[in-house]
Amino acid sequence: MKKGFVQTENFRRLKEAEKIVDQRGAIEASLVLVRGVFGIGKSMLTERWAAESGHVFLRAKETWTKQSMLRDLAAKMGLPLDGNASQVQDRIIGQLAVSMTPLIIDEADHLIPTSRVMRGGQRVAPMLEALRDITDITGVMCFLVGMERFPTMVLQFEHIASRVAHIVQLERLSIEDVQATIKAKAEVPMSPEVVAAIHSQAKGRMRWVLGAITNLEGWARANSWARIEASHIKGRPLCTEFTAQTATSGRES
């Protein structure tokens, strides 16, 4: 498979959201929630977008605390890690206030505590609070990328939710997206019927589209196909999906 990045409709949705939030009225309304189902390529898309745009990209971890989040963010920004959480946060704020570099936090569902954390009779999310302080003071945009229910999870914290400027819904890949992906990444040409079959079987998920391309390229090499036609794939599953059936049978679907 060729290396490269495909600018899908979801990529264009992110770019449009950035333009919208850049023109916002209230400077503290700087949070953008990005949501979508698993497998559609959220992480790959946002990390590549960050690399192309010069944004700071960080993947949240299930083991994060407020302090470890701030240290990971500081490390990503090339800042010293010594001192307490407040001192590390001050360095982050100081640099972002000058650079105004947007932040992208992937797997942002991990920012919501799994158990209730209370302060003054109100439920709080310490990691979201720390990010809110950073964005409030600096005015930098912060894209929080999570699963489909992530915006509902944020709504539990009204003072955080009030700072959400925009919600980006990442969609399953269209057939045009699949066609563009195959054109950019596949080493073997594929007929329109094959493209349609990949789109149908992958259910709009980038992870499975890439898996199908890999499978088809292997078959093409093994059979010396110069181009993959509909007759080559008739009755064959193109995507590898782990299901209850494959778990019990021990075979790939």
Image (cartoon, rainbow, N blue to C red):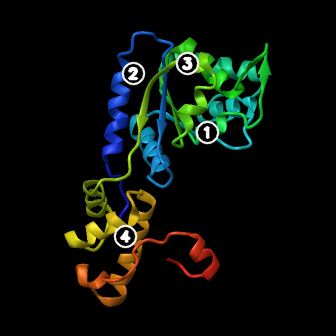
- In depth, the one of 205 and 153 nearer the eye is 153
Residue count near mark 4 (Cα–Cα under 10 Å), binned few <14, some 14–19, many ≥20? many
Q: Mark 2 vs mark 3: which is more N-terminal?
A: 2
SS class, disc 1: helix
Residue 110 in the image: above or below residue 97: below
Q: Mark 2 vs mark 1: which is more N-terminal?
A: 2
Label ID, residue 213: 4
According to the image, label 3 marks what residue? 135
Label ID, residue 21: 2
Task: Give the residue drawn at x 38%, y 60%.
Answer: 3
Cα distance between the residues tagged 4 and 2: 36 Å
**Could you tell whether 162 is left or right of 125 in the image?**
left
Q: Nearer the viewer, mark 3 or mark 1?
A: 1
What x and y, as percent, mark residue 27? 46, 11
Label ID, residue 18: none
Task: Name which quarter of the figure residue 149 lies in.
Answer: top right
Residue count near mark 2 (Cα–Cα under 10 Å), binned few <14, some 14–19, many ≥20? some
Cα distance between the residues tagged 2 and 3: 13 Å
Task: Give the residue drawn at x 45%, y 38%.
Answer: 50
Q: Mark 3 vs mark 1: which is more N-terminal?
A: 1
- In depth, the one of 5 and 165 nearer the eye is 165
According to the image, label 1 marks what residue? 109
Query: From the image, which quarter does the N terminus lie in?
Result: bottom left
Task: Give the residue drawn at x 39%, y 64%.
Answer: 202
SS class, disc 4: helix
Q: Which amino acid lies under the numbered mark 4 shown in the image of this protein?
A: Ile
Mark yes or no: residue 83 visible: no
Cα distance between the residues tagged 2 and 1: 22 Å
Q: Which amino acid lies under the numbered mark 2 shown in the image of this protein?
A: Val
